[in-house]
Image (spheres, rainbow, N blue to C red):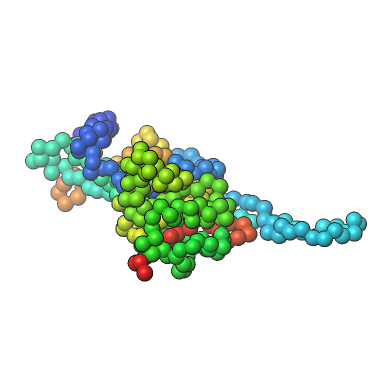
Amino acid sequence: MAAFNLSLPKLQIALNRAWVDSMYNTQFIANVAALRAQMQRQNVQLGKGITGTGKNAKQITQTIFWPVACTNETTACTDECLVATEVATDDSQDIVLSCLREAGFVESEKRFRVSPLAYEDVVAHQMLLKMKALDEYLNTQYIAFLEANKGDHDVYGATLTVGADNAGDWEIPSTDWNVALIPEFLLAMELAKFSNPYILDGTNFFTQKATAMAYSANADGKGENNLFNQYDWVQDARSMVTAAPNKTYLINTNAVAFITGNFWDVTPVTRAATHKVWKVASKNLPGVYYDVHYQESCSSNDFVESWKFRVNGVFALNPLACDETNTGIFAFEKVAGI
């Protein structure tokens, strides 16, 4: 088996070769439309969750402070000599990065004594598969985070003319899931004071939206497409159908943030004899890096290499001030028609 330092450049070449092969790389492309869209849109200013790398790396807690002044009322005019009575206070929230998930594999030297496959190609294949699995895990965790933090529809007065609230899900009969719902969602956004919202949809609007787009060139069809275009849409049918079947989320962009950090840099370093560490970029989630732990050992009459990939991060909800029911996330569910 080639030495680690000598095989790393070849491994990178193998990774690049596998990823650019348009037929071969389909097995490595992850279903991450939901999380990728949120990361592209979020604008969170927290600083680094992990500072430094290697032995100088320090995981720190980000503490966010904000003023709280929940009373915002007017009164009748009083004696000019009297002082005002409203007092503002402070609140805070801690953001801590932790290991969310890991994936790994082992390769045997004896395997390659008889296998015609190149070592670097096999390892590259495994790496891309494991990183894809982590990518998709993060995507489903993001959807689960939305579900766990969905807000109360009473925030906007629950004024939709169809459906009803059921434990945070606004349930709408399947017969009413059509373009006529778009103005209803627009009203909910307006009354809830969503400043930069988008819709995360799975299959509820998928066919209607695709049809409206296809018919948009027709004089009688462009109206529906114009209605759909009132929103910033994210379609993740493959993930939503399993992670949140029949759900559609209305999200205020900066209500949620996914924050990641790494203990290691892109250049591999030796930490303990044959234990080497570094970070590698996700191929599907721009900005996400996985910490890599590589070890060589001798076990069961064979030399083996262990590879582990770890993701450090946190899903965070924008700090809440006075109205804890307005999380910036509304959930809508398609239910059987009446």
Seen in the image, is 158 located left or right of residue 311? right
Residue at the outermost front position: 220
Closest to the observer, 108 or 18? 18
Residue 50 appears at what percent x and percent y?
A: 48, 44
Residue 131 appears at what percent x and percent y?
A: 30, 45
Quadrant (top left, top right, bottom left, bottom right) of the N terminus? top left
Seen in the image, is 125 located left or right of residue 93? left
Residue 135 in view here: no
Residue 217 appears at what percent x and percent y?
A: 35, 38
Residue 64 in view here: yes
Closest to the observer, 118 or 153? 153
Closest to the observer, 164 or 9? 164
- Please tell me which residue is depicted at 85% across the width and 58% down the height of the picture: 77
- Please tell me which residue is depicted at 19% across the width and 37% down the height of the picture: 23
Residue 92: quarter of image = bottom right
Counting every numbered tag in the picture gives: 0
- Please tell me which residue is depicted at 49% across the width and 62% down the height of the picture: 161
Residue 327 appears at what percent x and percent y?
A: 53, 57
- Please tell me which residue is depicted at 38% across the width and 40% down the height of the picture: 219
Quadrant (top left, top right, bottom left, bottom right) of the C terminus? bottom left
Residue 225: quarter of image = top left
Q: Is residue 156 above or below residue 296?
A: below
Seen in the image, is 112 located left or right of residue 81? left
Seen in the image, is 269 located left or right of residue 295? right
